[in-house]
Amino acid sequence: MTRYLRTPRAAVYAGVFLGLLLLPHFVDAYHLTLVETGLSLAIMALGLNLLLRYTGVLSFGIGAYFASGAYAVGLLYMYLPQYFSFELSMLAALAASAAVSALFGFVCVRHTRIFFSILTLALSMLLFAVLEKAYYYTGGSDGIRVPIPTFFGYQFEGMRRFAFLSGPYYYVVLLVFSAATLLMLAIVNSPFGKALQATRDNELRAEMIGVRVKRFRWYAFVIAGTFSGLSGGVWSFVNGHITPEICSWVFSGEVVYMVLLGGFMIFEGPIVGALLFTYLRLYAVAWTEYWMLIVGATLVILVLLLPGGVTGGLYRLIERLTPKARPKAGASV
């Protein structure tokens, strides 16, 4: 991890973070809120890519853990309003998503390939049904309203939600996103991350060298679910309202689309994909009621022309434009 931070990519990270830090001075509140949505969803996309790229399994039910985190925040407000604060809400979101992902993952990691994907989809729809039908506890299809929380005892009395989102909460989202990104970067470059890649490449050989494949896959599942729960907790304050739709297969499919759009073979790809998808869906919905047709068409074009996603295409373009050093005359090749 230390060696990674000494690479030129670390300077790019610092530049992007500085740009995001200064962004409120250059864009209006509306677009700033969209960026917050994209950053919060990017945390979940990073978690999904831990399963897809580094573990070699695809989850179609990542929304279940996103919903676990978001509903933990909403239920804390409904039933324990005296403890409703940002810090306790995040702890509740992490705990709920970790518990649900640990339970679901115990069932799912026993299978691979399409069986794994179908199991994740089925379990997420089971949770969706619970959230939809348990009206007296979860609000059913009406959902739960999430107000502005307190921050370590400080209350934003009299502040409108839009002013809160475009003001102090933007820096909170940026801080949580940055910490989650660095943590995931450390995970994938750790011995644990290398062990996950070994199980992805050859499960039998990984077992022969002592890697407990199912246990490591379960660990990755829980980590991905916890990241998704953190994403749901942060996003719930941005959206201000949570409904069971965030647990449906449609929402989980959108997250998969984000990862593919950005490029799952590049670490930063899911982040780029989440931000791009936020704006793509916004303008597609504003343009036509058949916005899902536009999203589907872009996915087909993406698979045919840019199988590595947007970031993969950019990396290939940079490699072509960057002149390669030629060996000196007389030097051995």
Image: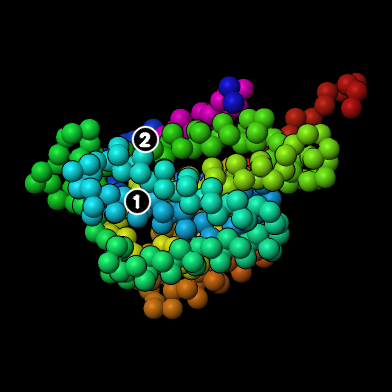
Q: How far apart are marks 2 and 1 (CA)?
A: 21 Å
Horizontally, is 8 left or right of 251 in the view? right
Give how far across and how far down residue 238 sits, in percent: 30, 52
Kindly tell me whether residue 184 is visible in this rendering: yes
Q: Residue 292 carries which label?
A: none
Disc 1 residue type? Answer: Ala
Disc 2 residue type? Answer: Leu
Q: Main secondary structure of the magenta part?
A: helix
Residue at 14%, 51% (x, y): give it.
Answer: 160
Give how far across and how far down residue 246 sits, in percent: 41, 62
Tell me which colouring the rendered structure shows.
Answer: rainbow
Kindly tell me whether residue 251 is visible in this rendering: no
- Is residue 227 or residue 302 the one in the foreground? 227
* Most distant residue in the left direction: 158
Q: Residue 175 carries which label?
A: 2
Mark 2 packing: few (<14 Cα in 10 Å), some, or many (20+)? some
* 85 w.r.t. 238: above or below: above
Magenta-drawn stretch contains 238: no
Q: Which mark is residue 72?
A: 1
Q: In which quarter of the image is residue 205?
A: top right
Residue at 44%, 74% (x, y): give it.
Answer: 291
Asked if the residue under mark 1 is in contact with the one under mark 2, i.e. CB atoms within 8 Å, the reply is no
Disc 1 on helix, strand or loop?
helix
Give how far across and how far down residue 30 sits, in percent: 27, 54
Residue at 18%, 34% (x, y): give it.
Answer: 153
The part of the chain drawn in magenta is 3-17
Q: Earlier in the sequence, mark 2 or mark 1?
A: 1
Magenta-drawn stretch contains 13: yes
* 267 w.r.t. 245: above or below: above
Q: In which quarter of the image is the N terminus?
A: top right
Give how far across and how far down residue 314 sits, in percent: 60, 48
Residue at 34%, 67% (x, y): give it.
Answer: 134
